[in-house]
Amino acid sequence: MHEKKMKKSLLMLVILILMVTGVWAQCPMCKQNVQSGIESGGKVGLGLNTGIVYLLAVPYLVAAIFGYWYWKNRNKL
């Protein structure tokens, strides 16, 4: 029974990895488009780094809030 679950989990992992490979190609494309836009005088890409920082910070902030809440209420749970 355990071996069957392991095979299913491995298959799901492989499927997920194969689905994500198309997304990995978009980072260089986005960077190239922003660079060419800035070089041609556009200002659209100037806030890209700030946007990346916000997108990066939100999951850590949520995890920190959850961790603090758990730490404060660990005796009540």
Image (cartoon, helix red, strand yellow):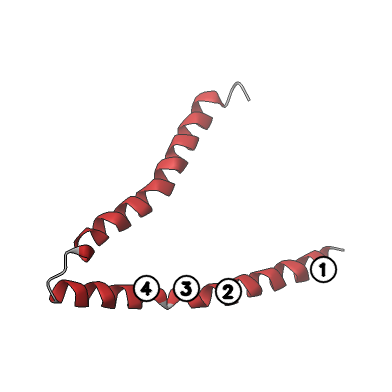
Q: Amino acid at mark 2?
A: Met
Label 4 to label 3: alpha-carbon separation? 8 Å
Q: Which residue in the rendered view is the most extreme toward the top?
A: 76
Q: Amino acid at mark 4?
A: Cys
68 above or below 58?
A: above
Dot 4 falls on a residue whose secondary structure is helix
Label 1 to label 4: alpha-carbon separation? 37 Å
Name the residue carrying label 2. 19
Mark 1 or 3: the one toward you: 3
- If the image is split into quadrants, where does the N terminus sit? bottom right
Name the residue carrying label 3. 23
Q: Indicate the quadrant where residue 24 lies.
A: bottom left
- 36 relative position to 2: left or right: left
Q: Indicate the quadrant where residue 36 lies.
A: bottom left
- Residue 38 at x, y percent in the picture: 16, 71
Mark number, residue 53: none
Q: Amino acid at mark 1?
A: Glu
Q: Are there few (<14), some (14-19), or many (20+) residues within 10 Å of tag 4?
A: few
Residue 59 vs residue 70, the one in the foreground: 59
- Contact? badges 2 and 3 (CB < 8 Å): no
Q: Amino acid at mark 3?
A: Val
User: Which of the two discs, 1 and 4, labels the residue nearer the N terminus?
Assistant: 1
Name the residue carrying label 4. 27
User: Which of the two discs, 2 and 4, labels the residue nearer the N terminus?
Assistant: 2
26 above or below 46?
A: below
